[in-house]
Amino acid sequence: MRIVTRPDFDGIVCAVLLGDVLDIRQPVKWVEPNAVQRGRVDIRKGDILANLPYDDRCSLWFDHHFTNRVYRSFKGIFKIAPSAAGIIFEHYKDQFKRDYSELAAATDKIDAADLTLDEVLHPEKHGYVMLSMTVVNGAEPDEPYWNNLTDLLRQYDLQRVLENPEVKRRCRQVIRENEKYMVYLKKNTRLDKHVSITDFRDLENIPAGNRFLVYSLFPDAVVNMRIRYEKKSKEMIAVNIGHSIFNRHCNVNAGLLLADFGGGGHRGAASTRFDSCKADTYLPQIIDALQKNENNEN
């Protein structure tokens, strides 16, 4: 029996909760949603899939992404909710070996982007927000840290986790990177009507940083679109769309929009990846839909 999940904070907390309640000892298999959608992941009978698209080879599935809904019978739970971890916590609520209620509530808040301006600009003052920003599911795998953080959160409370030397180092690194990221955002983001477009394709090394910072820098935008090459080979382009958490007037379901381009996600946040040769066709279409700002759920 394996836990198969996504390497973001919600995925890590899913692994914490499932590992505890089901006493799973096997290493977590960390994969990206796009790889599951394309059938590139070896899902086996007995696997528990969480925070990822459904695969009919798995034995249990827990998810909350709008575009991942399936209309067939399966074992597990799907519902629109702030986080997949929150669904798992509610499902097994009285069966855990320790109290994860604070961790589950924090994951709901972070994955739903229900953050204040102070939490975005000064995450170091807010423990769980700071911790979540040490998990970067970018171009380079970071499995030893994802596994270490999963183990720490299964055993200790927040303060003890934050005192771990590697976690402390990562937190300091995040603060430094956020300062640099602010500069990159200002230099590589343009405001096109009510859409802020961050284009990192000209950068050799894609900067890491707080994904919510752009909303504080461009308060007139209702949505942000971030474009980057997935790897240095530049064969694939990654696009992320996020509704502003401070100017909540975006009518477009981001998950549904990007489902038309091989991706998916939530109503307020979604992503896709596609061959670079499609960029001249896909990118203008996505931008046009965001600028029209029409409800696309009908």
Image (tube, rainbow, N blue to C red):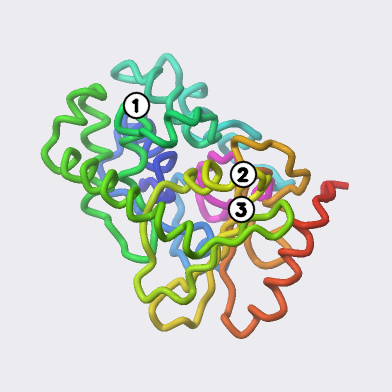
- Residue 60: % across, % down: 51, 42
Point 26% across, 31% down: residue: 153
Q: What amino acid is labelled 1 in the image?
A: His
Mark closest to the chain's N terminus, 1 or 3:
1
Dot 1 corresponds to which residue?
A: 126
Q: Which mark is residue 272?
A: none
> Does 65 appear in magenta?
yes
> Does 8 appear in magenta?
no
Point 42% across, 60% down: residue: 184
Within 10 Å of disc 1 (Cα), the crowding (few <14, some 14-19, many 20+) is few
| Distance in Å between CA atoms under marks 2 and 3 | 19 Å
Seen as rendered, the residue at the extreme left is 165
Left or right: 262, with 130 as reference point: right
| Distance in Å between CA atoms under marks 1 and 3 | 24 Å
Q: What amino acid is labelled 2 in the image?
A: His
**From which residue to which does the magenta span run?**
51-69
**Callouts 2 and 1 close, C-beta under 8 Å:** no
Within 10 Å of disc 2 (Cα), the crowding (few <14, some 14-19, many 20+) is many
- Residue 243: % across, % down: 64, 45
Q: Secondary structure under badge 1?
A: loop
Q: Mostly what secondary structure, the magenta segment?
A: loop
- Residue 122: % across, % down: 36, 33
